[in-house]
Image: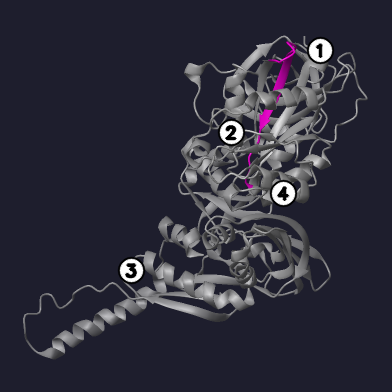
Amino acid sequence: MTSAEKIRNFCIIAHIDHGKSTLADRLLEVTHTIPQRLMREQFLDKMDLERERGITIKAKAVRMNYRSRDDSDYILNLIDTPGHVDFNYEVSKSLAACEGTLLVVDASQGVEAQTVANAHLAKENRLRIIPVINKIDLSVADPEKTKEEISVILDIPGDNALLVSAKEGTGITDILEAVVHLVPPPSGNPDSPLQTLVFDSNFDTFRGVIVFIRVRQGRICKGMTIRMLATGKEFKVEETGIFNPEMQPVDSLSAGEVGYFTAGIKNTSDVKVGDTVVNVLAPGVQRLPGYKEVKPMVFSGLYPINQENYELLRECLGKLKLNDSSLTFEAENSIALGNGFRCGFLGLLHMEITRQRLEREYGLSLISTAANVVYEVTLTDRRKIRVDNPALLPTSRTSVICEPFIKASIITPPEYIGTIMQLCQDRRGIYLNTEYLSHSRALLTYEIPLAEIIIDFYDQLKSKTKGYASFDYELIDYRPADVVRVDIMIARETVDALSFIIHREKAYIRSKEITERLKEVIPRQMFELAIQACIGSKVIARETIPAKRKDVLAKCYGGDITRKRKLLEKQKEGKKKMKYIGHIELPPEAFMAVLSREAK
């Protein structure tokens, strides 16, 4: 058993693509945690999606043994975190399990929007922040300017920031020395009653739920009966272990240590991230504050193309929710798509990653409906309801509809300020202020409806600024808005899965886009097909798919013209009848084409 004085728990936080995962690789190498023959890039990023996209999606924990320059042995528990704004909840979970953090800043890019947000999170959790300036090997690196930005923008002393190159391995030992000498050891008495924070979990087919924990006080070992305070469920511990970086069983985990335990937990709903685990023999232990709770901001319906996979989809969503506490889902039914689930996400990337994980890891084929936000609706009888599904928005009996607004912080080179202001104004943004952080960096602050940024705002921002601008946001409040529900009707039938909520001024343009795209992807029928976009009973856009025509004159090799006319009239009458009794099935491609990002 290791003394808590020799343990250091820390994480790495930074803006996306500032080198967190590469730095974690070098730390694993220098501490000889991973043999050189097994080393590969992004070692802690296990998912194929993470390696393909070059981003971290899930926070990872690993235990490293390090002998310092003064020949003292330490145990370092590292948690690598994501950088994209959609996965901020992963960062908040990691911070709750640590005493210190490495704040990594790219020497060529400087302080970005997500750097600011992560620094605030670390300060809120009262962590010891160690600034690290990475990528000093680049020809465009400017460490002195970056130090100044850290001091001015983040209000963190930047003069002593560590200069490193994670790619070349420069300065890695200095980071480890800073961690052991600057990050405080964990507090907590190993002889006190057990109090453990659950900061993540995973599901194993053979062992059940694997619970990732940080022991605050006391000791957890095999054979102990523990209780989950949030659910009240009790289990007998079957195994405790550490991440080295693979799971390695140990006899017990004591105060200050980070590791895992298994207890034959088969039901994923019995474990909640942020919960406190206690010993049933020591009642009265208080629940830990856990971490910052994050509510979903974007909602979409997920439906299996094959309805036989409905229960499988339910089971798979439950497994994903186990280590993704911000994912929510509840059953819903669509006339067009059958049975599915209404899922809540933190953003569009979060939604996209979740869908791809379901398709890749579990072999599901899915259709997703258009992403939308939650609206607060006040009915005429003064009752308030929350609507996350466009099909459920009342078209009557409403007095006020409020939409969520966010405060957007955009850091950009000054030459792109005009372009960004135009982009924000096109999205109904309200300008607040411009602050010049340096001669080459400006901070623009806007208030923008969340519905206007969830689709392609981030992509447009990167495109219009050649990748130089960075973006972060936080939800501020709900405000009254002139929004309407647009229903899509095909052959006089409303397709509920294609309904959407939009600001009245933009309803016509969006409706025109959708009807035109549907015309392209819906196959022609034997009768004329009308595609209409409606607000209530008013049609605001329409496209018509002409009927597929059979050549009834193929066998007429001449003769009187009246005979040909008679055949054509007969065909025309038949098509009129088919129009009334005809029923079409929309192919999945129709939904995918309309709901794809390009359609926005």
Pointer 3 and pointer 1: residues touching (CB < 8 Å)? no
Instruction: Give amino acid for label 4.
Output: Glu
Mark 4 or 1: in front is 4
Q: Which residue is mark 1?
A: 3
User: For the residues marked 3 and 2, what is the alpha-carbon distance in whole angstroms?
Assistant: 59 Å
Q: Residue at (41%, 66%) from the top-left corner?
A: 583
Residue 73 falls within the magenta-colored stretch: yes
Q: Position of residue 222 (x, y in %)?
A: 74, 11
Q: Is 544 situated above or below 348?
A: below
**What's the residue type where badge 3 is placed?**
Arg
Disc with the residue nearer the chain's start (4 vs 1): 1
Tell me where the magenta segment starts and ends, as one range: 67-84
Mark 2 is on which residue type? Ser
- The disc, 2 or 4, on the residue closer to the chain's N-terminal end is 4
Q: Earlier in the sequence, mark 3 or mark 2?
A: 2
- 514 within the magenta span: no
Question: Which residue is more in the foreground, 357 or 292?
Answer: 292
Numbered disc in front, either 2 or 1 = 2
Secondary element type, mark 3: loop
Quadrant holding the N terminus: top right
Identify the residue under disc 2. Answer: 165
Of badges 3 and 2, nearer the viewer stands 2
Name the residue nearer the viewer: 259 or 467. 467
Q: Find disc 3 in the rendering and name its residue.
A: 524
Q: Which mark is residue 149?
A: 4
Other residues around mark 4 within 10 Å, as few (<14) / some (14–19) / many (≥20): many
Q: Is residue 204 visible?
A: no
> Are the two marked residues, 2 and 4, in contact with CB atoms closer than 8 angstroms?
no
